[in-house]
Image: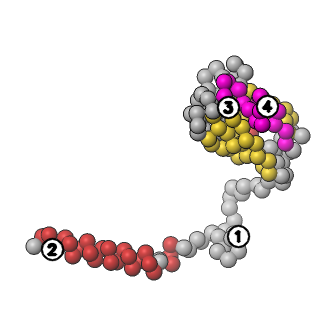
Amino acid sequence: MNKIFIAVILILVVIIGGFYFLNGDSTLDYNPIFDSDKDALKPGMETTDPVPAPTGNARTFVIDSSHLRFYMNGVENPDLVVNEGDHVRIEFSSSEGFHDWKIDDFTAATEKVNPGNSTFVEFIADKKGTFEYYCSVGQHRTNGMKGKFIVQ
């Protein structure tokens, strides 16, 4: 008797779940902040922490690491040059060793990755100058795993 009762309950749960899945629950699509037609804030719903839009160009650098060095297009520890306001994306991978890519002045860092893995970091180059990027693993920076990030 108990087995039949449990089977009936399970069948009802599956039927009811399937009904909601197939018909959709419109309350799940409702977003009180964004207007689905315009994807903009509704009046009176301003955020208190706006994210500034980048004013410059999008710049992507594909960087690999191997033997305590960074490489881009065959160049060892290349100078990365951008303009102030550029949106920067570092696509980072490791061919050898456990490494990351980090730049303190923009509070930007990739995850640490093992050989064969990749990650990325994005940030806005919001101040001019010459800065140092480096690998933060162990003594890799001291051993020469660093380069220049130049914002013009």
Nearest to N terminus: mark 2 or mark 3 = 2
> Element at badge 4?
strand
Q: Residues within 10 Å of mark 1 (few under 14, many from 20)?
A: few
Q: In the rendered structure, does residue 57 fall within the stretch colored magenta?
A: no
Q: Residue at x 84, y 52 (%)?
A: 56
Left or right of 152 on screen, residue 44? left
Query: Is residue 44 in view?
Result: no
- Give the mark nearer the N terminus: 4 vs 3: 3
Question: Can you say whether 57 is above or below 43 in the image?
Answer: above
- What residue is shown with label 1? 40
Q: Which residue is mark 2?
A: 4
As helix, strand or loop, the secondary structure at mark 3 comes to strand
Secondary element under disc 1, as helix, strand or loop, is loop
Q: Which residue is outermost to the front?
A: 74
Task: Give whichever of 66, 147 is nearer the camera.
Answer: 66
Return the disc, 2 or 1, that comes first in the chain's sequence: 2
Task: Estimate the x, y position of residue 128 in percent, counting from the top left.
Answer: 86, 39
Magenta: main secondary structure = strand
Q: CA distance from mark 1 to mark 4?
A: 43 Å
